[in-house]
């Protein structure tokens, strides 16, 4: 008989994201997650703490994966556009992600790890310092705003007959021009 995979925070967060996609944020619970992993709830708590911390870890993991998916050889506007699409794809294909972003608290040690990942990516793309910070904040707000509109069914109010994906691309291009990238 094979031994179960070792329980660690990465395995727990991956399983939690799978549960999120299966049943939505309302159905995500530590009890259901423990059952999915065939462990006890206290075992989960030893690795990820409480549900709020788990939600934060999930949010940061999804964002980190989106950043990591951008080709490292891109620069400036090309990198920025690729990041926009990577975040868009992550948010569009992860159930209830806009709600998760809204309620997930910050986790200092994970935040600093993702911040370092972002700083490195921004530097490779030539977007350092305050310009990089402003560009990234604007991009995250833009993508998450579009996610809220598309997932709430209100995208038609902003698209005027245009597909949401096409209108999103147009707004990213406007942002890139406005930031002089």
Image (tube, helix red, strand yellow):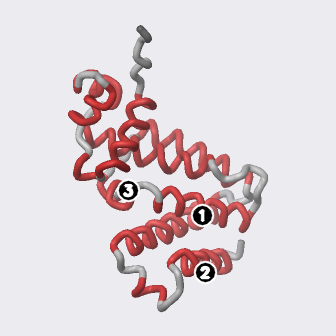
User: Which marked residue is nearer to the observer: mark 2 or mark 3?
Assistant: 3
Dot 2, crowdedness within 10 Å: few (<14), some or many (≥20)? few
Q: Tell me where residue 62 appears, x and y as whole percent.
A: 48, 48
Q: Of label 2 and label 1, which has the lower sequence position?
A: 1
142 vs 19, left or right, is right
Q: Tell me where residue 125 appears, x and y as whole percent.
A: 73, 57
The answer to whether the residues at label 1 and label 3 have Cβ atoms under 8 Å apart is no
Q: Tell me where residue 178 appears, x and y as whole percent.
A: 64, 80
Q: Is residue 10 above or below residue 16?
A: above
Q: Quadrant of residue 15?
A: top left
92 vs 121, left or right, is left
- Which label is found at residue 85? 1
**Residue beneath label 2, please?**
170
**Residue beneath label 3, please?**
95
Q: CA distance from mark 2 to mark 1?
A: 12 Å
Q: Residue at x 43, y 55 (%)?
A: 94
Q: Residue furthest bottom?
A: 160
Q: CA distance from mark 2 to mark 3?
A: 24 Å
Q: Circle 3 — which element? A: loop
């Amino acid at each position: 008989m094979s031994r179960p995979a070792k329980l660690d925070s990465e395995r727990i967060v991956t399983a939690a994201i799978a549960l999120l996609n299966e049943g939505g944020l309302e159905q995500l619970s530590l009890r259901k997650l423990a059952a999915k992993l065939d462990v006890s709830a206290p075992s989960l708590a030893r690795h990820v703490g409480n549900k709020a911390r788990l939600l934060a870890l999930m949010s940061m993991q999804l964002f980190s994966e989106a950043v990591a998916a951008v080709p490292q050889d891109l620069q400036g506007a090309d990198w920025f556009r690729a990041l926009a699409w990577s975040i868009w794809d992550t948010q569009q294909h992860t159930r209830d992600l806009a709600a998760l972003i809204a309620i997930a608290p910050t986790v200092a040690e994970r935040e600093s790890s993702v911040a370092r990942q972002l700083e490195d990516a921004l530097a490779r793309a030539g977007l350092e310092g305050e310009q990089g910070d402003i560009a990234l904040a604007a991009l995250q707000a833009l993508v998450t705003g579009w996610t809220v509109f598309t997932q709430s069914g209100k995208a038609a109010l902003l698209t005027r007959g245009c597909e949401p994906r096409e209108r999103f691309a147009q707004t990213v291009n406007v942002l890139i021009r406005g930031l002089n990238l």
